[in-house]
Every structure is written in structure tokens, then in C-alpha cells.
Amino acid sequence: MYKISQRRYLGNKNRILNFIDEIIKAEVGEFDSLCDIFSGTGVVGEYFNAKNKRIISNDLLYNNYVSLNAFLNPEPFNEAKLLKIIDEFNELEVDESNYFSDNFGDRYFSMKIAKKIGYIRENIRDLFVNNDINLKEKNILTTSLMYSVDRIANTVGHYDAYIKKDIREQAFVMKMLDLSKDKNTNNEVHNTDANLLIRDIECDVLYLDPPYNSRQYCDAYHLLENLSLWNKPEVFGVAKKFDRSKIKSEYSLKSAAESFDDLIINAKCKYILLSYNNMGEKGNSRSNAKITDEEIIKSMSKRGEVKIFEKDYKAFTTGKSSHSDNKERVFFVEVKN
Ligand SMILES: C[S@@+](CC[C@H](N)C(=O)[O-])C[C@H]1O[C@@H](n2cnc3c(N)ncnc32)[C@H](O)[C@@H]1O
């Protein structure tokens, strides 16, 4: 079974869940609801979901929305039916080419496996269109497909490029997800800009984990976005990316500090925690933080007294640069104003 954390994702917070929990225990104590408004994989929400909190999840990218729904939304699903479908998918031998193999075969995957991935995705679509599976079941199958794809992709963990050498033939295996069956009641999952959603929601704890540099997540995960949406758009360039102009994040642009300030001002919650990396000017320009510490503190101070917690942390980098003195920081404020 796949656990929610078994996916490679830039900036994922798997390794600092305890650190976040320690801060919440010390500074917040008991609470009912948490909004993870830049959810990514959703591991932070899932961690507190397991502790019976009401979780609001959100991400701008559709592929994350699909997996957040699979893991955290409260809709019912038929596990036995899904296990049977997954077994049938694993047995498949696919010869005919399709959208996925035409564009990604012999690049990110062997041609044989790319044919199978495209065939399975089309099949998930058909099962849903024919009412053989409900939306939750479609999201579970698509998420299982994405987690399986991630394990064998010929990349360093994201899809900005593929590794240009002979592709090793690997077994492609789909698995059921490790889903909590009784803890998701009252959870919500959204797929929108955090600055829009913030105006519509209320929660006890607001956890913020925005992108911190100019690397756009829609570029890094275009292939999974394409596979989850399955609109079969035209793709361009060596990396075979589709047009992502509508899903660029403000938090990776010059306007990041302005967006952050707007988010903080409009938050309706009791506590705010922000994870923000301290890469500063140390890395190459693409790694430089888009919001300065002064800007963060200035915005958060509008709501109350800001505290900063730090922990040494070896980040998941893309391989080229790695900073041993990386510190994971959490900025905290108890909302008073
Ligand atoms: C640092 S990652 C979050 C990682 C996550 N905490 C985890 O552990 O997997 C930042 C996420 O914010 C999302 N994002 C970027 N801009 C956004 C926006 N304006 N609104 C909502 N989500 C956004 C990205 O797609 C990305 O998944």
C-alpha cells in the first residue's frame, strides 16, 4: 500500500512533522481545525487528520487536488472493487501507442511502460464516464497511478527534465493507497489560489507552506498535472511541457511579498504557522528566497507577536546544490489583531 508520504516532492515536510507538532503542542494546545492551504502532497494535513482534527486542504495544482481528495476527503469508496481493478491493471500488456506514450515514451519512461501508463489512465477515465467508479474511486486510482509513475520515472524526482541515458526497464506496479476510513469526516479539499480561498474559510490553525523561490511547481510537475487532468494538450520542447500560463504561482514571482501580506491580512484563524526556508542569497539566483525575513515579520506582526522556531534540516534538493547549513524555520503568530 502507498502511504501519502511515499512520493518525491520538492519542499515536502515529511521530515519536520514532529517539529511542527512540537510547536503546536507548546504554543497552541488543543484545537479543532487546521487549514493546510499550500498542501502539496498533503502530509501535514494527514498528520493532524490522524489526530482527529478537521482538515481543510488546498493546492493550486490539480494533481495535488486529486491525491488530497484520495487521501483526505470523506466520500465513500469500495476497496474490494478498487483492489480488483488494480490487479487487472497490473496484469495488462499494452502494445498500442497513445497520447502518453507518443509524448513521454523513450523519454521519462520506456516506450513499453509509457504505453501501459497511458492505457491505464484512459481506462480510469472510461470507468468513471460509464459510472463504474465514483469520483473518490477515480481519484484513488489516479493517485495510485501517479505514485507508481513517480517510482519509476527516469528523472531526479521532478519533471523539469529527464535523464538522457538508456532507460532501465523496470516493473511497473500499482498499489492500493493506505487510506484512513473513519477520520476524514468534515474535511474539505480545494483546488484554488490560496489568496482567494483565504477569504472564504475559517480555522483554528492556519499552516502556510508556500513555494519560497522562483522554481514554479507547475513546471516541476507538469507531467503529473497532464496525467491527472487528461485533457491531452499539445506539449512543447525537450521536456514536453504543456501551456502552464494559468497555473503559475505568485509566490515564485516578484509579487510574492505582496501576495503573502494579503494572505496574512485576510486570514480568519487563531494561530498562523509559516514554513519558510532560509536559502537567502546562498544558492544560485533561482534558489533565492522571494520574501525576505523582514517582509515576513512585517506582515505577520500586523496580527500579533511573531516567534521564530528553527531546526537543522537536510532538504530534498535537486541534486545540483545542497546546503548542509539549511535551516527549516517556522514563523508563528497567535492572532490578536
Ligand atoms: C512547499 S510546497 C508544499 C509542500 C507540502 N507542505 C508538503 O509537505 O508536501 C508549496 C505548494 O504550494 C502550491 N502553491 C503555489 N502557489 C499557490 C497558490 N497561490 N495557492 C495555492 N497553492 C499554491 C504548490 O503547487 C506547492 O504544492
Image (cartoon, helix red, strand yellow):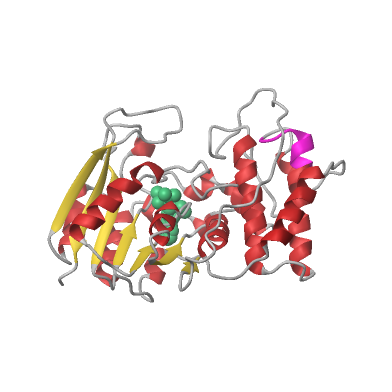
Residue 39 lies, in percent from the top left, at 43, 56
What residue do we see at 36% from left, 44% from top? 213
Pick the front one: 211 or 120: 120
Pick the front one: 45 or 31: 31
Pick the front one: 290 or 182: 182
Residue positioned most to the bottom: 200
Q: Quadrant of ligand 1?
A: bottom left
In the image: residue 331, left or right of residue 223: left
In the image: residue 82, left or right of residue 184: right
Q: Which range of residues does the magenta coloring cover?
A: 108-115
Seen in the picture, residue 31 relative to 160 is either above or below; the reply is: below
What residue do we see at 52% from left, 43% from top? 6
Residue 43 lies, in percent from the top left, at 44, 52
Residue positioned most to the right: 95
Q: Quadrant of the C terminus?
A: bottom left
Q: Is residue 109 magenta?
A: yes
Residue 237 lies, in percent from the top left, at 64, 40
Q: Is residue 249 visible?
A: no
Residue positioned most to the top: 165
